[in-house]
Image (spheres, rainbow, N blue to C red):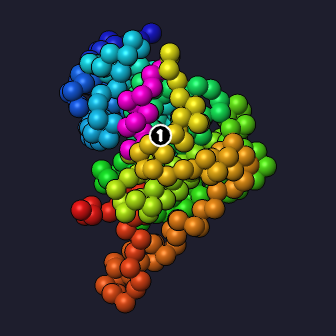
């Protein structure tokens, strides 16, 4: 038998919980409504608002417009659900984000805030303009990871050194992935669950390498920002979906650089991406370490790589 006190306590907890289980706010022109599945995840409400608002504002500026709904019209509202689970996860649909917060960061570093930024990026990349099929999953997932991490650094959710360390982890997970050097991104996309680290982390590394390379070839006038903005403008989620060839054309159009051989080797073919050509993460970390210690006699850092990682404090004119 349940005592009267227990019933009363249950009612009080229920009221207290329900008062905490929703949140509403405006962000980047969207009316955001959040539903938390329990009081534990509801405690994340202030940080969720900060991360999601920061991400939505950054992405709206990046793409030059809002995410679109399933009919292609500008999105007006966003419904977010936040639950807890044994492992972190996320999912997006037009106007919808579903976030599951796990007990700790995935793979030792990937916490729920990264999931929020990754899924929010999908409101554009996948839900506003969409891949044609599995062959483009490296771009769909990898570019979303790239911008999630770059945005986490820009928003100050992770420190400069953490951003470099995490990029190093991504390179390590990519170069140790099942199928590395044998299976192309194009082929791996059909089984992205089995080849998670090749598709997500290989795609992320591809985006980071392309971004740094484009900055280097164009005196920092062009980057992946221009490429994703063009895809957002030129494609949609159902009648005009992009292919890997379209990504190559978007790079050619925005940066006047022909990456067709690069795509043939590293996207359509299994040749590993030559990471060290443009990503000298170790020397960048060493520079940051020396600067922290007040040591000035160190080689100048790669400012373009800093820009790609989202840790360049002053943008070059
Ligand atoms: Zn994703």
Q: Residues within 10 Å of mark 1 (few under 14, many from 20)?
A: many
Where is residue 270? Give x, y as percent.
74, 49
Task: Tell me the quadrant of the picture where the N terminus can be found.
Answer: top left
Could you tell whether 18 is left or right of 85 in the image?
A: left
Residue drawn where x is 30% and y is 50% of the image? 155
> Does residue 266 sit above or below 89 in this rendering?
below
Task: Tell me the quadrant of the picture where the C terminus can be found.
Answer: bottom left
Question: Which residue lies most toward the right here?
Answer: 182
In the image, 218 versus 96, the foreground residue is 218
In the image, 99 versus 242, the foreground residue is 242
> Does residue 286 sit above or below 25 in this rendering?
below
Residue 249 visible to the viewer: yes
Could you tell whether 27 is left or right of 85 in the image?
A: left
Asked if the magenta segment contains residue 249, the reply would be no
Where is residue 199? Give x, y as percent.
63, 42
Question: Which residue has dot 1 on it?
Answer: 250
Could you tell whether 253 is left or right of 177 in the image?
A: left
In the image, 276 versus 289, the foreground residue is 276
Could you tell whether 6 is left or right of 275 in the image?
A: left
Residue drawn where x is 60% and y is 40% of the image? 138
Name the element at disc 1.
helix
Task: Specify the principal SS of the magenta part.
Answer: helix
Q: Quadrant of residue 293?
A: bottom left
Count of numbered circles in the view:
1
Question: Which residue lies most toward the top here?
Answer: 1
Residue 313 visible to the viewer: no
Q: Which residues are magenta?
A: 226-237
Where is residue 63? Give x, y as percent.
33, 36
Q: Quadrant of residue 21?
A: top left
Question: Which residue lies most toward the bottom here?
Answer: 297
Residue drawn where x is 59% and y is 67% of the image? 276
Where is residue 243? Give x, y as percent.
58, 31
């Amino acid at each position: 038998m349940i005592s009267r006190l227990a019933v009363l306590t249950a009612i009080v907890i229920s009221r207290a919980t329900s008062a905490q289980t929703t949140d509403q706010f405006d962000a980047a022109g969207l009316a955001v409504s959040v539903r938390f599945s329990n009081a534990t995840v509801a405690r994340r409400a202030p940080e969720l608002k900060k991360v999601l608002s920061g991400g939505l504002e950054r992405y709206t500026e990046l793409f030059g417009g809002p995410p679109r709904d399933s009919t292609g019209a500008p999105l007006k509202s966003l419904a977010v659900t936040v639950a807890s689970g044994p492992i972190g996860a996320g999912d997006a649909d037009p106007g919808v984000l579903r976030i599951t917060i796990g007990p700790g960061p995935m793979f030792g570093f990937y916490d729920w805030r990264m999931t929020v930024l990754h899924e929010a990026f999908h409101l554009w990349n996948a839900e506003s303009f969409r891949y044609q099929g599995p062959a483009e999953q490296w771009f769909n997932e990898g570019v979303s990871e790239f911008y999630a991490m770059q945005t986490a650094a820009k928003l100050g959710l992770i420190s400069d050194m953490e951003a470099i360390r995490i990029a190093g982890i991504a390179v390590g997970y990519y170069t140790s992935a099942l199928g590395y050097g044998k299976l192309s991104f194009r082929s791996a996309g059909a089984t992205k669950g089995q080849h998670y680290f090749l598709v997500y982390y290989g795609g992320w590394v591809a985006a980071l390498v392309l971004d740094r390379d484009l900055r280097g070839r164009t005196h920092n006038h062009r980057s992946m920002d221009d490429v994703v903005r063009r895809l957002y403008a030129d494609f949609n989620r159902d009648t005009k979906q992009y292919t890997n060839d379209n990504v190559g054309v978007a790079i050619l159009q925005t940066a006047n650089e022909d990456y067709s051989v690069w795509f043939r080797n590293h996207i359509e073919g299994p040749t590993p991406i030559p990471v060290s050509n443009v990503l000298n993460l170790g020397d960048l970390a060493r520079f940051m370490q020396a600067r922290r210690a007040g040591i000035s006699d160190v080689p100048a850092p790669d400012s373009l790589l800093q820009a790609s990682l989202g840790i360049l404090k002053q943008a070059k004119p």
